Image (tube, grey):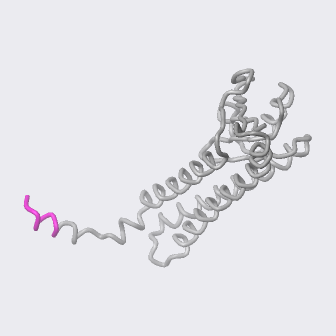
Amino acid sequence: MNFSSIKQKVREIDWKGVFLSRNFIIVCCMMLVAAGILVFSTAGGKTDTVSQSGTKVLGNAVLVGSEVADGADAEDAGEDSFFAVAVINRQRTRDSAMQTLKEIADSPDTMPDAREEALRSIATLVDEMNAEANIEMLVKSKGFEDCVAIVSDGKCSVIVRSEGLMEDEVAQILTIAVEQSGVSAPGITIIEKK
């Protein structure tokens, strides 16, 4: 095969069909969600994933501690801004994904199966956003000052501000997360942010 035959085959590809195909749309949405999770996980600054007492596994939930290591002033600023930055990053990622899916669903050029997939993805995002809001509200009602929940792809992470979670507190958070997200206990991670 020579270069001109390859060039001709590339010209013959229905690029519009490729970019509007169901698989392409799914891959793009997954990449957006993965990018958001990556941004969220790096937004908190320097973290230590093992608390002073080590990682605790209670039931099927995983409790992980973390702290900012750059002095008292940085620690106070990091604690106050971590939860706000996490919520903003999560919202930006979701807004971007939602906008992309709406454009696909509303486009007259979109194939019917791609439109249906986009509408299903929108419904899933809305359900995940509702679950996150409910988890955060219910965890805060249990006396925790700050909480951020992330529900995505059958997994749920709940980050709470605490100076040491007790086993009964972890059980309460786990129960809330299971009930609100529909994710089973092995798919839930509870992270303690000091």
Q: Is residue 139 magenta?
A: no
Q: Residue furthest left?
A: 2
- Name the quadrant containing residue 47: top right
Question: Considering depth in this image, is 181 or 132 the residue closer to the camera?
Answer: 132
Figure check: 167 above or below 104: above
Residue 7 sits inside the magenta stretch: yes
120 left or right of 151?
Answer: left
Residue 16 appears at what percent x and percent y? 36, 72
Residue lying at 55% horizontally and 67% vertically, measured from the top left: 100
Q: How many marks?
A: 0
User: Which residue appears at 30% of the width and 70% of the height?
Assistant: 14
Across and down, in percent, residue 122 comes to 62, 62
Is the magenta region chiefly helix, strand or loop? helix
Which part of the image, by quadrant, shows the C terminus? top right
Residues drawn in magenta? 1-8
Question: Given the current orientation, which residue lies at the most extreme top position?
Answer: 53
Task: Give residue 150's position: percent from left, percent from top.
Answer: 69, 47
Q: Closest to the observer: 111 or 78?
A: 78
Residue at image position (58%, 70%) is 102
Residue 135 can be seen in this image: no
Q: Quadrant of the N terminus?
A: bottom left
Q: Nearer the viewer, residue 100 or 22?
A: 100
For the point 82% across and 30% down, which residue is it?
A: 165
